[in-house]
Amino acid sequence: MRYSKTNDYIFNLDDIREEYAEATKERFKHHIGNIREGKDFGTQTLNPLGKQPDDWWQIQPIAPSAKERLGYPTQKPEALLERIIKASSNEGDWVLDPFCGCGTTVAVAEKLKRKWIGIDITTLAITLIKSRLEKKFPERNLKIKIDGLPKDLAGARKLAEKNRFEFEYWALGFVNAIPAQNKTKENMRGADKGIDGIINFYMELNNGEEKVGTAIAQVKSGGVKRNDIATLKGDLEREKAAAGIFITLDQPTKSMVAEAIAAGHFEAKFGPVPKEYPKIQILTIEDLLAHKLPDLPAGWTNSIHRIAEAEKEDHRQPLWSAEE
């Protein structure tokens, strides 16, 4: 279904035509007349670009193992949005998605060389979309403008005061961490107490064999003290994590820094000589705004999402429908 307020609308039928059924193509190999009510309307032929789509579309759902899948609960197939955008806009036109979620609409709009605006109320979604676009289109050197998220320390403090939950998501996005599961605004500690986010990275790559390590991320928007680092050390031992990343809005105390240094190092091996990395690292929001990242092994894996890549349709899969 589509709607236009005026008769001035775009409908690019030829851009979305579908292949004819084999039976139809076979039938039209022979001469088919077109006589109605005694009038000859000429020979019927097939459109070389294909048939007009039906009012229901056969578009495959995203397979669990598909490169396109990001793990976002309401993610739609790129093929669906590609058909809609091709049919209803031209290159250079504007596309608006006011509930853009994981950014499938804006990613397809960018692919099809449309201008776009995406809106979402969660910082997690905005962070995911920005990273998705930058990694999907590296050659375009995108300059993505984001409104509504902190750009300085004062803005970060306002977000923390207004909504600690969104502040945490925003901070985790800087270090590409997966937010902890089962956390809610009402239960900020969640099921995994002491874990706000997880970062996965390679600890060893040797003759095709991979060893993946984990870093626990904790975010603090209020007062911090030495005991916070001691608690993080205990969380690392309990979870058997290689490292801990402590993100704080306030500056750490000298005793906190000393406690972090005393935690020692972990090793990662990508050649004959292992390299050491700090086991506990303290990063302030000021550091993150200045683009400082955790000191983790090079090649640390993308954690907050996967890079979405378009998949060819697999017709063995069940069909996706709007009711799902």
Image (cartoon, rainbow, N blue to C red):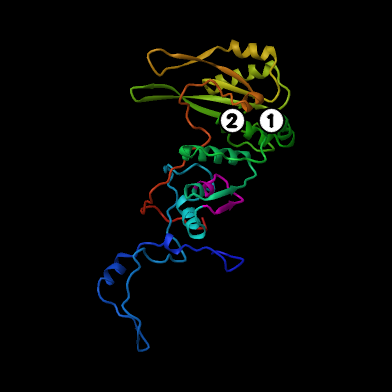
- x, y (%) of residue 271? 38, 16
- x, y (%) of residue 7? 57, 69
State the residue position of label 1: 152
Indicate the amino acid at tag 2.
Phe
Q: Are marks 1 and 2 in contact (CB under 8 Å)?
A: no
Give the Cα separation between the discs numbered 1 and 2.
Answer: 13 Å
Indicate the amino acid at tag 1.
Asp
- x, y (%) of residue 242? 51, 20
- x, y (%) of residue 145? 61, 40
Q: Is residue 163 above or below residue 240?
A: below
State the residue position of label 2: 174
Q: Secondary structure at mark 1?
A: loop
For marks 1 and 2 on the same chain, the one whose residue lies earlier in the sequence: 1
Q: Name the quadrant containing residue 14.
A: bottom left
Q: Which residues are magenta?
A: 92-107
Residue 314 shown left or right of residue 177 in the figure: left
Can you tell which of label 1 and label 2 is closer to the viewer?
Answer: 1
Mark 1 residue crowding within 10 angstroms, few (<14) / some (14–19) / many (20+): few
Q: How many numbered discs sit on the rendered protein?
A: 2
97 magenta-colored: yes
- Residue sitting at the far front: 92
Q: Is residue 245 above or below residue 321?
A: above
Work out whether residue 311 or residue 15 is closer to the camera in this orientation and state it.
15
Q: Name the quadrant containing residue 32.
A: bottom left
Q: Is residue 201 above or below residue 43?
A: above
